[in-house]
Each structure stands twice: as structure tokens, then as C-alpha cells.
Amino acid sequence: MTHDGPRFQLPAITPAIKLLLLANLAVFAANALLLGRLSDPGAGSDGFWFAFSWSSLLEGHGLGLLRAVSYQFTHSFRDPMHLLMNMLVLFFFGTMAEQRLGPVGTVRLYLWGGLAGALLHLGVSSLQGQADVPLVGASGACYAFLLYATCMAPRSMVILVIFPVPLWGLAVLLVGVAAYSTFVEFATGFSGGVSHGAHLGGAMLGALAHRAQWFVDRGARDGFFAGLIARWRTQRGRRQRRAAAARELQLDEVLAKVKAHGLGSLTRAERQFLERMSQRTRDD
């Protein structure tokens, strides 16, 4: 839950995030009605339609490649908490990202974040000899939004359990847990059923997308740069006003010295300053 001050406020849901939430909920409901044939490994590999794995990619004369997309909207009906946590992340941080990305860019970040998660999961699980373990869930995409939002506003405050923490702290914690858990998997050969590789893949894609300015729609990008230019002009105007005030103060001091002691009392630097100010007055 994000906030900008002492009061917490739910973000207004944005168009693309609303669409993605509804898609995930619809697939979850269909999966429950079909008793897990979309996402539950207990249904058997023949019925595990939407999951991502190495062996499934080449099925159906290439149609298996679609599982790199379908798995991102699929959650096991036996684990509704997995869906709930992913949807909360998507709601809070996806709406932040959409303010800059726009609706189309938000969907693209979701899909590419999920794809990056799938690829890193495939690499990690292959090294562990578990390349055919099916993968489902929106976690890779959600980690992409988490890191993208963190790069946008790292000092925004979020609630972790009951304590407010900066968004960058939450991102460091979650990515650190994913990295350490991946290390433990390699060290012990034991996987707890969570694809931490998918989390890391999505997180890396989200951070890189922000740095490289991927997926930003033209209107949002123009607005972003217009804001930067406006802030630069404001800062430049402030510097110019401070410099002018300093010159006026120095000029008053020099003229007071001339009045009190004459031109001969001025140093070389003071004479040069007086000449520059005289020239500036003539030019104006």
C-alpha cells in the first residue's frame, strides 16, 4: 500500500491493470471449475494446458510457445494466496507504472516481465536438472512492476506487515530473498515449489525497462520529458535570480566604497567588476 504522506490511500485503478486483473481472475475461476486442468500438476501433464516448461514448448507444432504467455495468467486453484499476493502487487505497483507507461506499455511490461521470468526459470531449473517442472503464475510480471515502480519512486512509503518502509527497502528485501533462495536451491538441491528464478528474471527486466525507457508510450514519454525540462528551467531561473541578487549586493558595496574613499580605493578586481556592470547596463 503506497502513500505520499501520513495518510494512506488506495491508488485509482488504471485501465490496463484492470484488464490484467480481470484476465487473471477469469483464468483462475475457469481453472477451479475445471478442477485444475489449466494449472494443477495433479491433473496430469496431458491436462496441464497453460503451464510453461521445456518439454511443453515444442508441442502442437510450435503452439506450445504460447505457454510462455498463458502461464502468466494461470494460478493453481489449490493456492489462492498465490493469486491474491500477485494481484495485490499488480494493483499497487502496476498502477504506479501505468502512470508513465500508459495502457499499452503496461501490458507490454507485464508480458515481457513474465517472459523474462520464464526464461530465467528455465535456465535455473535446467542447471538443477528440473527443466520439465511446470511453471505457472504472474510472479515474474509482478516483480517487473515492483522494480519498475521502485526505480520510479524509490522513497515512496509502503506498509510491510504493519511497519512503513521505503519502496526501495521492500524491493531489496524481496529480490534478496529470491537471490538467496536460488543459492540455497543450488547448494542443497532442494526446491520448495517456488520459482525464485522467475522472480529474479522479472525483477531484472523491470529495472532494465525503466533504465532503458522501454515500453513508454509517446504521450507519457513526452509528458515525462516535458516535466524534466520544466524543472530544469525552474532551477535555472532560480540560479539566475540568485546570481543577479549577488551582483546587486556586490555593486552596492563597491559604490559605497567609491563614495566613501574615491575610485582610487578600488582594487583591480573591483574595477573590473564595475566595468562589467557598466557594460551590462549599456547592453541592456
Image (cartoon, rainbow, N blue to C red):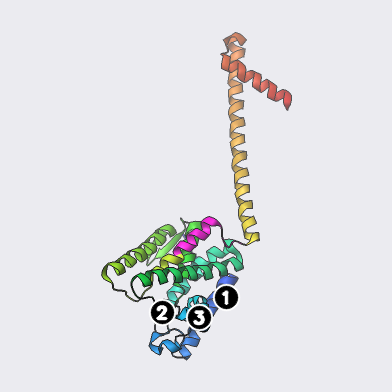
Which of discs 1 and 2 lies nearer the camera? The answer is 2
Q: Is residue 213 magenta?
A: yes
Q: Where are the magenta residues, as a range?
A: 203-216
Helix, strand or loop: magenta stretch: helix
- Could you tell me how far apart the alpha carbons at marks 2 and 3 are, in whole angstroms? 13 Å
Question: In the image, what residue occupies the spot 59% across and 42% down?
Answer: 235
Q: Is residue 46 above or below residue 87?
A: below
Q: Report the amino acid beneath label 2.
A: Pro
**Does 147 sit left or right of 188 as displayed?**
right
- Could you tell me how far apart the alpha carbons at marks 1 and 2 are, in whole angstroms? 25 Å
Q: Report the amino acid beneath label 1.
A: Leu
Which of discs 3 and 1 lies nearer the camera? The answer is 3
The residue wearing badge 3 is: 64
Residue 106 at x, y percent in the picture: 56, 67
The residue wearing badge 1 is: 19
Please tell me which residue lies in front, 32 or 15: 32
Task: Looking at the image, tell me whether mark 2 or mark 3 is earlier in sequence order.
Answer: 3
Q: What secondary structure is found at the residue carrying circle 1?
A: helix
**Does 28 sit left or right of 250 as displayed?**
left
The residue wearing badge 2 is: 134
